[in-house]
């Protein structure tokens, strides 16, 4: 395509030049015709910074993952402005700690709670605040209970030949940070030691079921996280 266009354009330009010269010779009063190149198109606007593709609110968890390429400290310039009175549209994520048998499934969008349902925006860039709550591996407390589990099939029935086994339950401290999504600024943080000492409801088997299952840790109830951040989310922006 590129090699074809010049061969078509050059004869046309030569013909235009010849016609112009002929007209000038016959009628000196006629102003010369000048062929000028068309103005170059305006340059395209500079591309946006390397921002993550956000199609659903759940995609904002990329900013909670420390191993991801997108750093929350840079913020997301297309996010809603954090200003005025609350409540402010907020996405809340939490991650529970797993043992040899992992549970929690990584970062989870908290969607059900007394207030959280009202905080969630319809679109990810509609969020003004982002909450990330994670466990601190250095702040696991003492053993508080023993949890019993048994391998099950897909219907939740005990698997043939499986036997129940016990796993120690330890107290886990969680840390949360509230970010202004547009700027990445920290607007609040704190720690939560779950009041609940219940065993995790289920464990997802990883590896050989006959190996030592290790330990499990207390999970962070949504209501406790909700209570911890509600004053920031529902209060006036500074």
Image: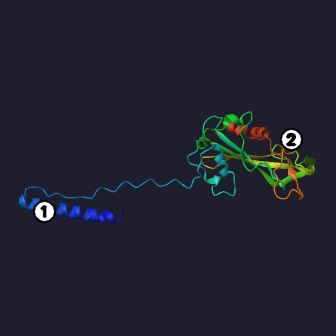
Decide: few, some or many residues near mark 1? Use Cα within 10 Å; few <14, some 14-19, many ≥20. Answer: few
Quarter of the image for the C terminus: give it: top right
* Callout 1–callout 2 Cβ contact below 8 Å: no
- Colouring mode (rainbow / by chain / secondary structure / one colour): rainbow
Q: Which label is found at residue 21?
A: 1
Q: In this view, does 225 lie above or below 208?
A: above
**Direction from residue 132 to residue 126 in the image, left or right:** left
The kind of secondary structure element at disc 2 is loop
List x then y, in percent, for residue 80. 58, 42
Label placed on residue 110 = none
Query: Could you say where residue 84 lies in the image, as x and y percent from the top left?
Result: 61, 36
Q: 155 and 96: which one is in front? A: 155
The residue lying at 27 percent from left, 62 percent from top is 8
Q: Residue at coordinates 64% horizontally, 52% vertically from top-left?
A: 72
Q: Name the residue under label 2.
A: 196
Q: Which of marks 1 and 2 is nearer the N terminus?
A: 1
In front of the other: 65 or 147: 147
- Residue drawn at x 88%, y 46% as measured from the top left: 158
Compared across the picture, whether 131 is left or right of 102 comes to left
> Label 1, label 2: how many angstroms apart (C-alpha)?
94 Å
């Amino acid at each position: 395509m590129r090699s074809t266009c010049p061969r078509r354009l050059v004869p046309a330009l030569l013909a235009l030049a010849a016609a112009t010269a002929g007209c000038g010779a016959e009628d000196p009063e006629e102003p010369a015709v000048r062929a000028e190149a068309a103005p170059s198109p305006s340059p395209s606007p500079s591309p946006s910074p390397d921002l993550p593709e956000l199609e659903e609110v759940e995609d904002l968890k990329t900013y909670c993952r420390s191993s991801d390429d997108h750093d929350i400290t840079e913020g997301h310039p297309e996010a809603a402005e954090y200003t005025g009175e609350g409540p402010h549209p907020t996405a809340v994520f939490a991650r529970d700690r797993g043992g040899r048998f992992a549970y929690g499934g990584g970062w989870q969008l908290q969607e059900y709670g007394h207030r959280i349902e009202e905080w969630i925006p319809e679109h990810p860039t509609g969020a003004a605040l982002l909450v990330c709550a994670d466990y601190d591996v250095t702040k696991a407390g003492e053993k508080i209970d023993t949890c019993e589990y048994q391998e099950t099939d897909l219907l939740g029935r005990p698997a043939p030949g499986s036997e129940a086994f016990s796993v120690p339950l330890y107290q886990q401290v969680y840390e949360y940070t509230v970010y202004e999504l547009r700027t990445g600024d920290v607007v609040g943080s704190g720690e939560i030691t779950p009041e609940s000492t219940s065993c995790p409801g289920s464990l997802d088997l990883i590896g050989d079921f006959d190996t030592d299952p290790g330990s499990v840790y207390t999970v962070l109830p949504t209501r406790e996280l909700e209570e911890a951040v509600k004053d920031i989310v529902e209060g006036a922006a500074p």
